[in-house]
Amino acid sequence: MSAATTEALLQTPLYDLHLALGARMVPFAGYAMPVQYPDGLLREHQHTRQAAGLFDVSHMGQITLHGPEAAAALETLLPMDVLGLAPHRQRYGLLLTDDGGILDDLMFVNRDLAQGGDLTLVVNGACKHADLAHLQARIGQRCEVRAHFERALLALQGPLAVTALARLLPGVQDLVFMTGGAFTWHGASLYATRSGYTGEDGFEISLPADAAIDFARALLAQPEVHPVGLGARNSLRLEAGLCLYGQDIDTHTTPIEAGLAWAIQKVRRRGGAREGGFPGAERVLAQLDGSLPLSRVRVGLRAQQRVPVREPAPLHTPAGLPVGQVTSGLLSPTLDVPIAMGYVPPEHASPGTVLHAIVRGKPVPMEVVPLPFVAPRYHRG
């Protein structure tokens, strides 16, 4: 990036550390972010799968909801069970438009709301200001909505992440997948959840901006930990079959089309104790129970030739009929074959179906395969 470009972008609290580590910086969600370090994308990806990778995800938005009605209020905006979420448990959530499209996907954790704590949301960086305005407009009269966009957020991912982090935060090893806890490090208040965006075991750690560089350096001093940039974060999440907002899901995509029905708990479905009551519920629940047929669904695709397939490559039948589009695609570092996700009509979505991705005018045969491409290794206890 040029100096002029850099000056126009926001900087995370770890910006100076990225430069000191030799990162190649790129614009992302309005921030100057590290796409890779001198080791390169492939080694960073492999190191995360084998040991522990440290990611700066401070561009994402941290928002807290406070007050006795916070859980009930949030439940009016997404099709997840918020009221039933136990203290220090975390869930994946979806903010929906009034017709059931996805405004954003997010993570939310109950930081002991009943005892004066809060619900903390982590939303996508490119959506955070719109999400904040949406929350304030829709539920700001029922609970207090606070932005904490100045806080840092680090992700430590990989099978040895727990080994490294436990040296700095004793007790963190007791967390299991999708749980969180409060910790103190050198006087700074941290909150860690055992979750992430790679399919590996790992943690996301929220902490004050002024403690971020020192804490990151302490992590990087652990023999298991290497810095990892956005490039490997993208290849890791695609291998794990995870959606990237703005590519794989958006306001024109419903949760059911996106294959995210698993995230809608029974209590919010038809026949559940708190059925519906969220934006777009009629459409989403009709798609979920099959009374409203789907026109397209998200699928995994594995190339039969060693030709990288990237978004937005069109998808055709072998006979040349256009049926869909690739939304994310790259050469999988773990599988050493091109993989992709995209949308096609249900009649073309069965595993084993062969479709052609059109790359530079030429067809590349791809087979529809189940997601994820690489099995997750979350620590469920």
Image: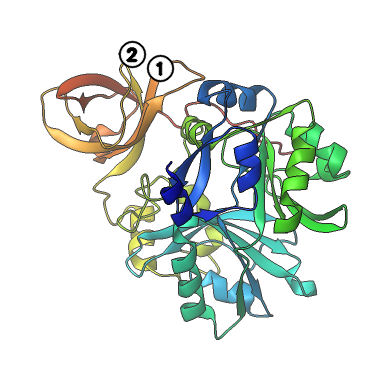
Instruction: Give the residue drawn at x 68%, y 80%.
Output: 67
Residue 6 vs residue 61, the one in the foreground? 6
Residue 268 vs residue 85, the one in the foreground? 85
Q: Is residue 277 visible?
A: no
Residue 305 vs residue 127, the one in the foreground? 127
For the residues labelled 1 and 2, say whether their Cβ atoms are less than 8 Å apart. Answer: yes
Q: Is residue 217 above or below residue 377?
A: below
Location of residue 122 in the rendering, given as x and y in whole percent from the top left corner: 58, 58
Q: The N terminus lies in which quarter of the figure?
A: top left
Residue most extreme to the bottom: 141
Which numbered tag is attached to residue 306? 2
Which residue is identified by label 1? 337
Residue 202 vs residue 268, the one in the foreground? 202
Q: State the SS at label 2.
A: loop
Instruction: Give the residue drawn at x 80%, y 73%.
Output: 115
Quarter location, residue 303: top left
User: As shown in the figure, which amino acid type bears the numbered disc 2?
Assistant: Arg
Residue most extreme to the front: 3
Location of residue 36 in the rendering, given as x and y in whole percent from the top left corner: 53, 32
Label 2 CA crowd tier, 10 Å (few <14, some 14–19, many 20+)? few
Location of residue 239 in the rendering, given as x and y in whole percent from the top left corner: 48, 29
Quarter location, residue 301: top left
Q: Between marks 1 and 2, how big is the CA–CA gap? A: 6 Å
User: As shown in the figure, which amino acid type bears the numbered disc 1?
Assistant: Val
Q: Is residue 39 visible?
A: yes
Q: Earlier in the sequence, mark 1 or mark 2?
A: 2
Location of residue 378 in the rendering, given as x and y in whole percent from the top left corner: 66, 35
